[in-house]
Amino acid sequence: MKTEQLKELGLTEDQIKAVFAENGKDIAAEKAKYDTLKTDYESVKTQLTTANTTIDGFKDYDEIKGKVTQYQAELSASEAKSAQILSDIDFQKKIDAAALKHKPHDASDVLTAAEIASLKASKNQDVDIEAAFVAKKASKPYLFPNDEPFRNPVLPTGNPAPKGKKMTIAEAMAYKNLHPEVDVKTLI
């Protein structure tokens, strides 16, 4: 709407100013609505971009789900392995305690691998380990030190050199059944 058109309709200058003032109010109100809608549109556009980015991140959902399952399986296996190691350590402590109590010459010679496997599977390991050591001590006493007092001492060995006398190299070689041609340095 232009000023000339309003003058042709017979409106005065004051009336034309009033019409433009009212028209300006309507335009300002519509512009405010437009600005609000534009702001809302930009907000929705930003949200849509964010949502699309998030959705793109879920494209590998099956792969991620597979990895989670794999990691859970690895965790379970690791926990089982740790429990087995702790169980083995506890079992070994029981074996070591029994060996310390019975004092065999060599603890590794007392129980066979089959006996150890049987004892590991036992429900009452402490009692069974003790019984195994007692049975071995009864059946194979040579694996354990003798508790009897020492009654038969060994007589002196047949050392040809009397006390206080030193042997010559030739006498030592003859005693060891060595030939005189042998280099003495190889004996030292």
Image (cartoon, rainbow, N blue to C red):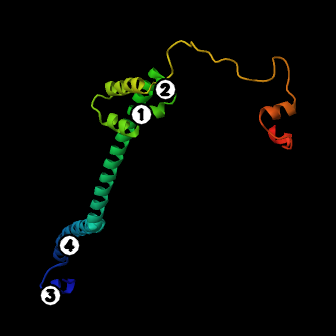
| 4 or 3: mark nearer the eye | 4
Q: Amino acid at mark 1?
A: Leu
| 3 or 2: mark nearer the eye | 2
Which residue is disc 2 drawn over? Answer: 142
Which residue is disc 4 drawn over? Answer: 27
The local secondary structure at tag 1 comes to loop
| 1 or 3: mark nearer the eye | 1
Crowding near the residue tagged with mark 2, few <14, some 14–19, many ≥20 C-alpha atoms within 10 Å:
few
- Mark 4 / mark 3, whichever is N-terminal: 3
Residues marked 1 and 3 touching at CB (< 8 Å): no
Work out whether residue 76 or residue 48 is closer to the camera in this orientation and state it.
76
Which residue is disc 3 drawn over? Answer: 8
Residue pictured at 50% horizontal, 14% vertical? 148
Residue 77 position (above or below residue 142):
below
| 2 or 1: mark nearer the eye | 2
Residue pictured at 58% horizontal, 14% vertical? 152
Residue 174, horizontal then vertical, whole percent? 81, 34
Residue 50 shows in the view? no
Residue 91 position (above or below residue 103):
below
Q: Quadrant of residue 119?
A: top left
Instruction: Tell me the distance, in whole angstroms, between the alpha carbons under discs 1 and 4.
Output: 102 Å
- Mark 2 / mark 1, whichever is N-terminal: 1
Residue 120, horizontal then vertical, whole percent? 34, 36
Name the side, left or right, on which 49 lies relative to 6: right
Q: Amino acid at mark 3?
A: Glu
Crowding near the residue tagged with mark 3, few <14, some 14–19, many ≥20 C-alpha atoms within 10 Å:
few
